[in-house]
Amino acid sequence: MMAFPMNSKLRLSNSQSQHKLEKTYHIYTNELAEIVYTIIMPELPEVETVVRGLRKPLIGHTIHSMWYDWENTIHSPYAAEFSARIVGQTVKAVNRRAKYILIELDTDVLLVHLKMTGRLYVADVDEVQHADKWVHVRFGLDDDKQLRFSDSRKFGKVYLTDDTEKLLGHLGPEPLSDDFTLEVFRERLSKRNKQMKALLLDQTFVAGLGNIYADEALFRAGIHPTTKVEQLTDDDIVLLHQTIQDALNAGIQHEGASINWYRKPDGTKGNSQDHFYVYGKDGTPCQVCGTVINKIRVAQRGTHYCPNCQPERLL
Ligand SMILES: [Zn+2]
């Protein structure tokens, strides 16, 4: 996910330093866990909503300048090359792969990953928006507008590449594409034996799901989050294949979940959070059976489920 402040040379040569580093590492991971816990990260429906909102203001427009004040946001190539290469290119299309935004240009693709607090939007050159205080990259457009990348936590990244496969080739299938057939799903499941919650979060298994929509998909399929692949019946597999798509489509229909950070490119909130069955509903009655929704930790993530609709499976 990200580099921790570890120095392997020190670690090997000095046990005192090792102790100190372990302490730092421990504090850092705790802080990180807290951040991950409190900030709801954009998933496929949120990123898809951003993509849909950017098509109109971007397609057909040429990038004529680039400004940045935080070089680490620019993943690759180096900022100077990035800037020289992108200027003069026209936006042909705006698409999504997993949780990445793909702005297709004449010869390159501008890739953006929002990570935790990224916001991507187009504004008039002299327009001031609330999210501007965290803007670290701006692309000037030919119509006196700017594409702005705002990112308070600074974990988001922009990439410029003519080979998206190199960056995205490791990702699993798009769950809403025609390629994600029941046969493909079944075949991929047969090669794994993780707990289902952990597996749905694994971007190499299927791309785009995160903590919210994994919980929602499992609820809709009546599958307890700790269920292992080998415990699934064929009916479970058929149902889960459908509910992954249903949960994501519901998220898109309601334009993403604005629980705290995420906003649409026009600055307004999505409503997906008003339509959840289990995510964030711990302590409240299940909408289907009335049993109190429970929250546990699975794969280091807060996991919400209904103990009655999703009974624990015993081998
Ligand atoms: Zn229930």
Image (cartoon, grey):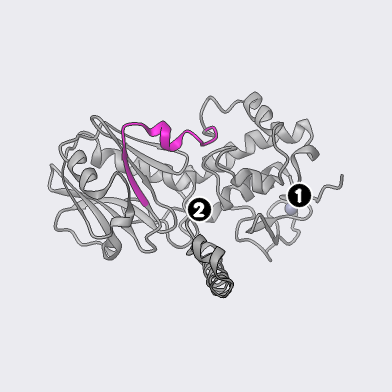
Question: Which residue of the protein is positioned furthest toward the front in this rendering?
Answer: 13
The residue pinned by badge 1 equals 310
Between the C-alphas of marks 2 and 1, the distance is 30 Å
Q: At 25% from the left edge and 54% from the top edge, which residue is drawn?
A: 137
* Coordinates of residue 191 in the picture (x, y in percent): 69, 32
**What kind of element bears circle 1?**
loop
* Coordinates of residue 215 in the picture (x, y in percent): 63, 50
| Other-residue count near label 2 (Cα within 10 Å), few / some / many at <14 / 14–19 / ≥20 | few
Q: Amino acid at mark 2?
A: Met
* Residue 6 visible in the current orientation: no
- Residue 223: quadrant of the picture: top right
Q: At 17% from the left edge and 42% from the top edge, which residue is drawn?
A: 84
| Other-residue count near label 1 (Cα within 10 Å), few / some / many at <14 / 14–19 / ≥20 | some
* Coordinates of residue 121 in the picture (x, y in percent): 29, 51
* Coordinates of residue 244 in the picture (x, y in percent): 60, 39
Q: Which residues are magenta?
A: 157-173
Q: Is residue 187 left or right of residue 24?
A: right
The number of numbered discs placed on residues in the rendered structure image is: 2
Would you say the beta carbon of the disc 1 residue lies within 8 angstroms of ligand 1?
yes
- Quadrant (top left/top right/bottom left/bottom right) for the C terminus: top right
Q: Amino acid at mark 1?
A: Gln
- Give the vertical position of 59 relative to 40 (above or below): above
Q: At 74% from the left edge and 39% from the top edge, which residue is drawn?
A: 229
The residue pinned by badge 2 equals 1
Is residue 163 part of the magenta span, yes or no? yes
* Residue 273 visible in the current orientation: yes
- Give the vertical position of 179 relative to 170 (above or below): above
Q: At 46% from the left edge and 63% from the top edge, which residue is drawn?
A: 260
Query: Of residues 43 and 137, which is closer to you in this image?
Result: 137
